[in-house]
Amino acid sequence: RTFHHTRHNHLKMLLESDPIGRCFFVVAVIPWLVSIPGSHAGHPSLFSANWNDSSLLRPYLKEDAALFGRQFAYVILDRSGAADTYSGSFRIYWHGVWALARWAANANGFDIDPFSLVIRSRPDMSFDNAFDFQKLINLFRTDTVAGHHLQVGQLFDSDLSMFTSFSSYETDIAAIVEHGQRSGNESYVRFGMHNGWCRGRVLANPPGCITASGYGASASPTSARSGLASSTGHEFESCRPYFIFAWENHAFCRLAD
């Protein structure tokens, strides 16, 4: 997939962005399919002949892991049913990167700073510039609302890239989606997915915040083996985040040869 070609830019951006430097961790949640057959939007696939050969994935991912060192974790998913649809897959991916980050922290014995910066992106995004994140991180740490409920990015196409705090990503997106899935209440899932698309305050339907419980704030050693967070009964508040419109683009990497 295109991350094989964009990963060097991702790493360069992280290394050169202040104050991240070498203090970062990358998680990837991907389907087992290498690509799609034929072409997409007129762009031929590099893997048209063997688009569903899952044996190609592991060598690429091992190269990714070597490039990022011990700061890279990944999980390969096999999807079926509603999870194999375009809209259905996002709830799995967006929850999955959080669950994998929690699992990696538990497995490696480190804590995740709730005000650390989260950059959620796609493998076909090419970051060609470094960022100065210091002021944004300072805002997360000093402003109660911003630290827990603020997003920076673009409307509706936020699957391309979005910046937020780990606290906001956890409670406003991932955990409330998990709560909705566990409880069978689709309204909680929709609440989290609207936030995941940076539509929370734009579609400002009441309520502004909801309270839920039972998300996997700390993966147990047993669940860590499966890569999934465990239910802890932890009560939390999920809100519609405030949103700063920062850019609008749909420029990603598609290689023809």
Image (tube, rainbow, N blue to C red):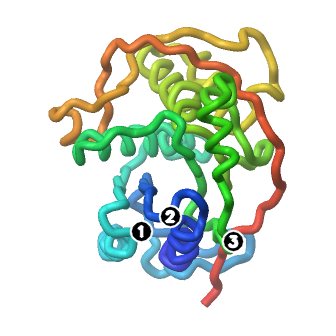
How far apart, in angstroms, are the residues tagged by discs 1 and 2? 36 Å
Q: Are marks 3 and 2 in contact (CB under 8 Å)?
A: no
Quadrant for the C terminus, please: bottom right
Under tag 1, what secondary structure? loop
Q: Secondary structure at mark 3?
A: loop
Q: Nearer the viewer, mark 1 or mark 2?
A: 2
Left of 89 or right of it: where is 50? left
Q: Which residue is mark 2?
A: 21
Asked if residue 55 lies left or right of residue 26, the reply is: left
Could you tell me residue 71's position as x and y percent?
A: 36, 60
**Residue 119 on image: x %, y %:** 58, 51
Sequence order check: which comes first, mark 3 or mark 1?
A: 1
Q: Earlier in the sequence, mark 1 or mark 2?
A: 2
| Gap in angstroms between the C-alphas marked 3 and 2 | 14 Å
Which residue in the structure is indicated by mark 3? Answer: 129
Residue at 56% across, 42% down? 90
Q: Residue furthest left?
A: 222
Question: What's under tag 2, amino acid-wise?
Answer: Gly
Viewer-proximal residue among 161 and 116: 116
- In the rendered image, residue 184, in percent from the top left (x then y), is placed at 47, 15
